Amino acid sequence: MTTENSAGVRAGWRSLIWPGLMTLVALAILIGLGVWQMERLAWKEGLIASIAEELGKAPVPLEQPADAWKALATEEYRPVSVKGRFRHGDERHLFASTDGATGWHVYTPLETEGGHVLFVNRGFVPDTMKDPATRAEGQVNGVVEVHGLLRKPGVHGSFEPDADRAHNVWYWRDLAGLTASLGTGVDPASVLPFFVDAAVDPANPGGWPKGGVTRLDIPNRHLEYALTWFGLAVTLVAIFAAFAWPRLRRGSAA
């Protein structure tokens, strides 16, 4: 190789330093995103399997024996049953969208036969039925038996606004906030540390609130996302190769 050719090759390589570094950075990001999606895939598959396992279990009473709820406090989606009386005057409304319809999930405290207070998500009502007076038939009195799924308290997301307590508007399953909103009439220590989403059957009188709102069709597209990121990484390598090869050839031919 002549001195001129050698200089041309070195110039060709030097011209690729910054494009190469930027390509390496972008490649690391794309591969990292693909790996992250694979980790999310494993987590999501575990979650779906855990939900299916819980749903396959027989319903259990929360208060038989009296402290049975303690062993269930760490579970999620477990079918349970509990008896008590609703405190309809203290129902709380959590903003929700169900099957494309905007409305509210009605969370009502239940005074259990065991002396506890349990927030029950009785189900969905459209915005036109937020006022309990529009569904008076469903405001059942006396002792009721609630069947549903155990749900843990929610986590306040960064994009979820704070509750508007003055207008009884809530945006996430804020157990501490809901408990505090009951005032001094309820001992916070008596509030059970979870929620129950009421089942669709038996339906409430008048049909509202409409139970069975627990979302069980958990989307799982993480493999698709991972393949997309990995595919983009391969494409990036191909583009860089197509960019670099002519420059190196011109340098060696100079």
Image: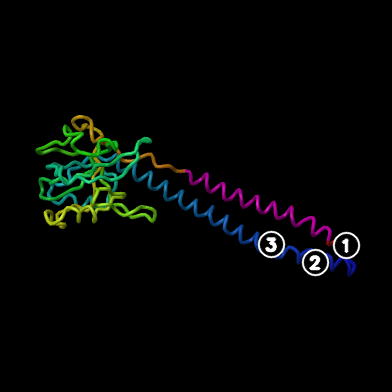
Residue at image point 25% right, 39% down: 130
Q: Residue furthest front?
A: 166
Q: What x and y, as percent, mark residue 249?
A: 82, 58
Disc 1 element: loop
Alpha carbons under labels 2 and 1: distance apart: 10 Å
**Where 63 sits versus 138, above or below?**
below
Q: Are marks 2 and 1 in contact (CB under 8 Å)?
A: yes
Magenta stretch in the rendered image? 221-250
* Of pointers 2 and 3, the one earlier in the residue sequence: 2
Image mark for residue 254: 1
Question: How far separated are the C-alphas under marks 1 and 3?
Answer: 22 Å
With 48 as the anchor, is 88 left or right in this view?
A: left
Of residues 61 and 246, the one nearer the viewer is 246
Q: Position of residue 80 (x, y in %)?
A: 21, 42
Q: Quadrant of residue 52?
A: top left
Which amino acid does the dot numbered 2 rest on? Ala
In the image, is residue 119 above or below residue 187? above
Residue identifier under label 2: 11
Give how far across and how far down residue 159 sits, in percent.
39, 53
What's the residue type where badge 3 is placed? Gly
Residue at the extreme right of the image, as rendered: 2
Precedes in sequence: disc 1 or disc 3: 3
Q: Amino acid at mark 1?
A: Ala
Give the crowd class for mark 1: few <14, some 14-19, many >=20 residues within 10 Å: some
Specify the principal SS of the magenta part. helix
Q: Residue at x 70, y 52 (%)?
A: 239
For numbered disc 2, what is the local secondary structure? helix
Q: Residues within 10 Å of mark 3 (few under 14, many from 20)?
A: some
**Which residue is nearer to you in this view: 113 or 43?**
113
Image quarter hosting the N terminus: bottom right
Identify residue for label 3.
Answer: 20
- The answer for how far apart the CA atoms under marks 2 and 3 are is 14 Å
